[in-house]
């Protein structure tokens, strides 16, 4: 288990390049802009989803991490986001991966991998046993599916016509090695 979240987040940041930290409410506009660069439907859903988001403890239930970079003016801004939330309290140790996006201008720099690894490390420290993510079956989400599969996820479910006729929801899962 994680006893001191400040220490935990400093360790995560030290182990990963680029820099990672918990998402703050001040990051929200940039995170939503980043999501909108990828998909306007996801932007609308993320905007609604973040309305009830807790920025801060209790991190055991939900958190979002951002990868940050410093621009020429010294301003720090998020260039990637990922997070997790607990599924329910009956099915112990089950979490869902939250919005996972990297600014298109920063893709290919290992940011997505660092974020996924940090989420997995955190959930393993919380003794989680499984992490799920859902995505669309449309071809334009193929890169996302490939990304998740490269990071240990495999398809475990498919809900036909979930998002719209002909657009299924794919559910991918990854078992975790709880500490």
Image: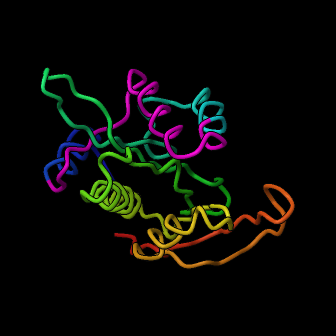
* Residue 105 horizontal/vertical position (percent): 32, 45
For image coordinates 17% across by 53% down, the residue present is 17
Give the number of marks.
0
* Residue 25 horizontal/vertical position (percent): 43, 23
* Residue 135 horizontal/vertical position (percent): 63, 61
* Residue 143 horizontal/vertical position (percent): 49, 67
For image coordinates 34% across by 41% down, the residue present is 66
Does the magenta portion include 21?
yes
Residue span colored magenta: 15-43
For image coordinates 59% across by 71% down, the residue present is 172
Q: Quadrant of the N terminus?
A: bottom left
Relative placement, left or right, of 78 versus 32 is left
Q: Quadrant of the C terminus?
A: bottom left
Tell which of 122 and 170 is nearer to you. 170
Q: How is the image coloured?
A: rainbow
Tell which of 144 and 172 is nearer to you. 144
In the rendered view, would you say 71 is above or below 153? Answer: above
């Amino acid at each position: 288990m994680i006893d001191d979240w400040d220490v935990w987040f400093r360790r995560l940041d030290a182990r990963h390049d680029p820099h990672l930290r918990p998402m703050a409410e001040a990051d929200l506009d940039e995170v939503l802009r980043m999501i909108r660069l990828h998909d306007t439907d996801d932007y609308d859903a993320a905007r609604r989803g973040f309305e009830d988001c807790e920025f801060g403890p209790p991190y055991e239930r939900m958190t979002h991490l951002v990868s940050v970079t410093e621009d020429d003016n010294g301003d720090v801004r998020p260039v990637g986001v990922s997070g997790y939330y607990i599924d329910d309290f009956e099915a112990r140790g089950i979490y869902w991966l939250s919005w996972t996006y990297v600014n298109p201008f920063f893709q290919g720099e290992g940011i997505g991998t660092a974020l996924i690894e940090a989420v997995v490390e955190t959930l393993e420290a919380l003794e989680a046993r499984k992490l799920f993510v859902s995505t669309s079956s449309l071809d334009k989400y193929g890169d996302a599916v490939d990304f998740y599969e490269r990071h240990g996820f495999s398809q475990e479910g498919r809900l036909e016509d979930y998002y719209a006729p002909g657009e299924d929801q794919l559910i991918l899962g990854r078992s975790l090695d709880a500490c």
